Structure formats: C-alpha cells, structure tokens
C-alpha cells in the first residue's frame, strides 16, 4: 500500500511539474493507470491510494478482474487502451467507460450498433497510426476525416485522438503531430504518453496519459 501510494504520488508530481512548465493545470490531465496483466490484488493498493482510472488491453481480462473490484470501489473507471476486435464490441460497451482504440470503419459500425443496443454511449478516442506502423493499429492520417465523420454519424461520442509513437525514436514530433491533428478537427482530447515519455506528452498537450510500468513496476 505504501509503495503504491509513493509511486502514484511521484507520477502525479511529475505530471504537475510538466504541466507547470507548459503553463497548464495539472487537474486538466487524466492519469490512466495501465493495469493490463496485473491481478486484482496488485491493483487494489492503487485504488486504496486514490487512483480511480485504469487501463486494460483486453476485454476478457477486464471482464475477469473488474466486476469484483468495482463492487468494492464503485467510483473506479476502466478504459480500453488496447486493440478491439469488432466481434467484442458488445462486451466492450458493457465493461468499459472509455475506448481509446477506435481505428477503422468496421469497428465504427460494430460499436455504433452495440451502443444502440445497450442504450449506452461510450466516449471514444480515434487511434491514429502516427508513425505509419501497421502492426500497432490505428487510422491512417489521410483517412482520419472520413472516420471521424462516420463515427459521428453512428452517434459515437468522439472526444479526441490517441497515438502510440514508434519505439526507440524521439516522441516529441509525433506528439506534436497528434496535437495538431486534434486541433484541426476540433477535438479536445489527446491520449498520448506512457511511462517513458508522459512528461513530454503533457508539455505538448496530452489530456490523458497511459502509465503502467512507473506505477506497477516491470511486467513479468
């Protein structure tokens, strides 16, 4: 518990410092604790330390862990930060409070139908293939206007853009490009920055940072 609180406090302090440098307010940045592959027992100390928003990569894993955790911590929210298969759209709408990986027309169709069936509108980020890496998923920059229009027509709340910059490369230009794309399309949300670069992302305009290792330690 003490270790979790210490790590959480350090990350929050780093976010606040980066925000000050950029002339921003720390409270305008949402910290998502990426709890993928970590057990409920590992997640609980962060919940007890005051963290409320968590990120999972897979629908099945979230379904297994979060119902019981939410019974004890009803204020907790769970965001999907990994890729989503279209055939899991109904399950995703049921379990997640936000989806960060909307990236293709077939998924727009599936999520639109799932949200209509559930009478639940889940806020979504459109993931952009900012580094032209097909293996990571993401909408091509050229296709972004059409995908945004399609999602809005399907009554999916689009609140911003998300990216995962290429590994091993200075992330600043990629964050700056996502910031510009979001601004060009009138979107306030920028889901960008992970444990190794979230402070840079905050300085460039991130509204949501996805931090796992700095909070939970290295995964097995």
Image (cartoon, grey):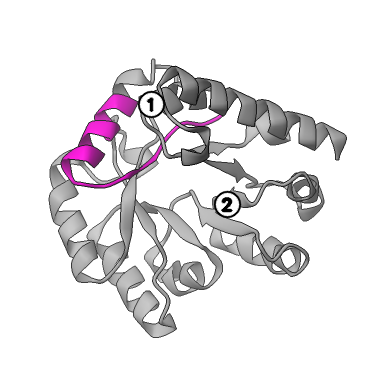
What segment is highlighted magenta in the picture? 175-195
Q: Is residue 193 above or below residue 136?
A: above
Displayed quadrant of residue 84: bottom left
10 Å crowding of disc 1: few (<14), some (14-19), many (20+): some
Residue drawn at x 28%, y 33% as measured from the top left: 179
Observer-nearest residue: 64 or 179?
Answer: 179
Q: Is residue 197 visible?
A: no
Q: Secondary structure at mark 1?
A: loop
Q: Which residue is mark 1?
A: 166
10 Å crowding of disc 2: few (<14), some (14-19), many (20+): many
The spot of residue 62 in percent (x, y) is 62, 60
Q: Quadrant of the C terminus?
A: top right
Mark sitting on residue 114: none
Image position of 216 (left or right of 117)? right
Residue drawn at x 69%, y 69% as measured from the top left: 67
Could you give the CA–CA distance between mark 2 and mark 1, rounded to whole angstroms? 20 Å
Observer-nearest residue: 91 or 160?
Answer: 160
The spot of residue 34 in percent (x, y) is 60, 43
Observer-nearest residue: 206 or 93?
Answer: 206
Q: Quadrant of the N terminus?
A: top right
Q: Earlier in the sequence, mark 2 or mark 1?
A: 2
- Is residue 179 rendered magenta in the image? yes
The spot of residue 178 in percent (x, y) is 28, 34
- Is residue 145 rendered magenta in the image? no
Residue drawn at x 44%, y 28% as measured from the top left: 202
Q: Is residue 139 above or below residue 121?
A: above
Residue drawn at x 38%, y 75% as measured from the top left: 115
Foreground label between 2 and 1: 2
Mark sitting on residue 56: 2
Q: Is residue 14 visible?
A: yes
Q: Secondary structure at mark 2?
A: strand
Q: Is residue 181 above or below residue 105?
A: above
């Amino acid at each position: 518990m003490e270790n979790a609180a210490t790590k959480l406090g350090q990350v929050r302090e780093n976010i606040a410092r980066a925000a000050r440098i950029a002339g921003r307010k720390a409270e305008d940045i949402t910290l998502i604790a990426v709890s993928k592959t970590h057990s409920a027992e590992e997640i609980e100390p962060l919940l007890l330390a005051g963290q409320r928003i968590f990120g999972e990569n897979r629908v099945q894993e979230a379904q297994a862990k979060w119902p019981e955790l939410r019974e004890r911590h009803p204020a907790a929210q769970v965001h999907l930060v990994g890729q989503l298969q279209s055939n899991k759209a109904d399950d995703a709408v049921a379990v997640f409070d936000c989806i960060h990986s909307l990236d293709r027309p077939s998924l727009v169709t599936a999520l639109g139908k799932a949200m209509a069936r559930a009478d639940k509108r889940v806020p979504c980020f459109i993931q952009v293939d900012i580094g032209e890496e097909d293996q990571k998923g993401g909408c091509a920059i050229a296709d972004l206007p059409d995908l945004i229009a399609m999602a809005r027509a399907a009554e999916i709340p689009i609140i911003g853009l998300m990216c995962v910059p290429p590994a091993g490369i200075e992330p600043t230009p990629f964050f700056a490009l996502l910031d510009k794309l979001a601004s060009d399309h009138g979107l306030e949300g920028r889901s960008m920055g992970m444990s190794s670069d979230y402070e840079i992302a905050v300085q460039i305009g991130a509204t949501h940072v996805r931090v796992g290792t700095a909070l939970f330690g290295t995964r097995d």
